[in-house]
Image (cartoon, rainbow, N blue to C red):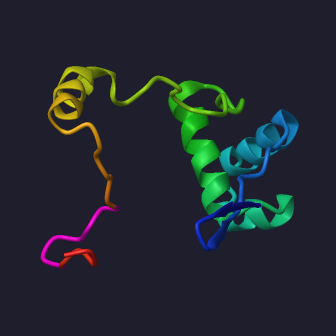
Amino acid sequence: MVLTGRRLARMGKVYSDDLRRRVVCGDGGGQECGDVGAVFDVAPSTAGNWYRRYRRESSHAARPLGGDRRSKLTEHAGWIGERLAETPELTLLPPVRAGSRHPDK
């Protein structure tokens, strides 16, 4: 588990390729996702997602972990640099829902 703010976040499980293959074969054999999930101790949604991915991509292998590691701000570097040149000390505030007031205002 990872502590994020005040809540604990559970990390996803890593499943073996063999388990994925057996679940996909069970779903492909006409069994319901819930039944297959119960037999192999995975969530019905997981069984269904693996089966749909197998039908789409012909692969039951896990996707790489970690996601995109490139900066999301690279394309905005010029704008950010200009703002910092105008005001060297900026404070980032947490996002606020539309229509509500920020606690600091």
Q: Residue at x 74, y 66 (%)?
A: 35
x, y percentage for residue 38?
79, 67
Q: Is residue 28 magenta?
A: no
Q: Residue at x 79, y 37 (%)?
A: 21
**Residue at the image position 18 percent from the left and 79 percent from the top:** 100
Residue 51, picture quadrant: top right
Query: Residue 41 versus residue 88: which sits nearer the camera?
Result: 88
Where's the N terminus, which quadrant? bottom right
The prevailing secondary structure element of the residues shown in magenta is loop
- Residue placed most toward the observer, 27 or 50: 50
How many marks on residues?
0
Q: In the image, 41: left or right of 35?
A: right
The residue segment tinted magenta is: 94-100
The image quadrant that residue 6 belongs to is bottom right
Q: Is residue 32 visible?
A: no
Residue found at x 71% / y 43%: 24
